[in-house]
Amino acid sequence: MYLKKDMYEIRLESIGGFGANLTGKLLGEIGASHMEVETQSFASYGSEKRGSPVKAYVRYSNREIRLNEPVRRPDLLAIFVMSLAGKENLMAGVGSHTDVVVNSHEDHDRVRDRLRMHKGRLWVVDALDIALECKSRLNMVMLGACVRASGFIPLEFAEEVVKEVLGSKYPEKTTANIMALKMGYSRAECREYTDDKYPYEEYKEPQRVKGWKTGELGGINPEFGNSVTNSLIGCREGYVPHFIREKCIDCGLCDSTCPDMVFQFEKGVNKGMDLYHCKGCMRCVEICPTHALVESEEGRYDDNIGCIDLINKEFLFTDIGENSWVDSESTNNQEV
Ligand code: SF4
Ligand code: SF4
């Protein structure tokens, strides 16, 4: 008997392209074919493209599973990208019963603060770094870390499933994948939090602002500039531009190149970026003539944390929830 409780629930939070969906399927396969428990595994995502939010859910039980809904109170929560910090429901249901596995190069306290994690055990693993080292994928590392954090899934079962499921499709990758799995397992480091620094978050059923009752006639969206006001944090793949003010000559090329009006100019001076709206395309890095913009890992510097709380306070920020925006004074439309 592997399970010590009636039901064990896992929620994986990611964006498209990192393989969270596959990780969920592999966890399901481990339960169903090796641990003789009732297993459920399904995912929820929007369009099949890189950058859109992905959630995968896995349940193990000693009894028949009759639930078919998102995991609201996870025993294990895995966060594949830190740029999701601050998103609604990300930390929902996390408490002293939860093991939270996070892909990050930062220390535990910093990760906890960015996630505003209530209580529980926080497992941090630099999955991107390990994946690059092994020439594998980030999701293999996260699978290893999840197996470890669960405390009851045997690593050898995960190895067998990776060999069976992925080995038949990509046999040339098996050695690298197994290495990544094992390194994720052994390098995930845990720290437990029992204090009340951040409050417990209840799971909130996602609500549509505009529906059949409240939508405009003909389904028109009357909000001005609505294509530039959405958070683009979820589109990024772990990298954002880092701005080095001392090297900037205020030429404005980044501002006219950026498709999302991220740069904030005041009286012809580049004041920095509103990274809430940056999708990480790196066009500005390519165009900058003085290398005042460089590609950097998200969160490596204080100014490039993709978190709404940390938007440069100098900017005039209009907070209306998901569709918030920063009012920008661009050099393109003001006298210098
Ligand atoms: S392109 Fe580079 S030098 Fe020019 S304003 Fe932007 S950051 Fe400054
Ligand atoms: S990477 Fe640069 S150009 Fe691309 S969205 Fe972000 S700030 Fe704009």
Image (tube, grey):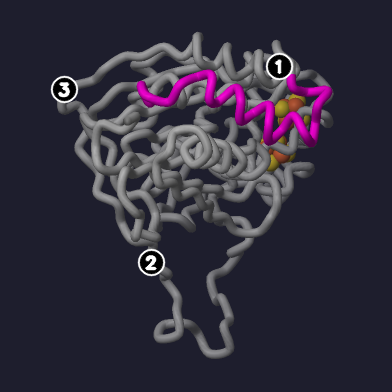
Dot 3 surroundings within 10 Å: few (below 14), some, or many (20 or more)?
few
Q: Quarter holding the C terminus? A: top right
* Residue 33 part of the magenta segment: no
Indicate whether 142 appears above or below 73.
above
State whether residue 85 appears in this view: yes
Ligand 2 within 8 Å of disc 3? The answer is no
Which numbered disc flags the more N-terminal residue, 3 or 1?
1
How far apart in space, not on screen, are marks 1 and 2 (Cα)? Answer: 38 Å
Which amino acid type is marked by label 3? Asp
Which numbered disc flags the more N-terminal residue, 2 or 3?
3
- Image x and y of residue 72, in percent: 32, 49
- Viewer-proximal residue, 167 or 246? 167
Which amino acid type is marked by label 1? Leu
Residue 296, picture quadrant = top right
How far apart in space, not on screen, are marks 3 and 1 (Cα)? Answer: 35 Å
Rendered-image quarter of ligand 2: top right
Which numbered disc flags the more N-terminal residue, 1 or 2?
1
Residues tagged 2 and 3 counted as in contact (Cβ below 8 A)? no
Of helix, strand and loop, which one carries label 1?
A: helix
- Viewer-proximal residue, 271 or 38? 38
Q: Which of marks 1 and 2 is in front?
A: 1
Q: Quarter holding the N terminus? A: top left
- Viewer-proximal residue, 52 or 24? 24
State whether residue 312 appears in this view: no
Residue under numbered circle 1: 132
What label does residue 195 carry, if any?
Answer: 3
Residue under numbered circle 2: 207
Q: Nearer the viewer, mark 3 or mark 1?
A: 1
Q: Say which residue appears at 50% left-offset and 15% top-offset.
A: 185
Residue span colored magenta: 150-174
How far apart in space, not on screen, are marks 2 and 3 (Cα)? Answer: 31 Å
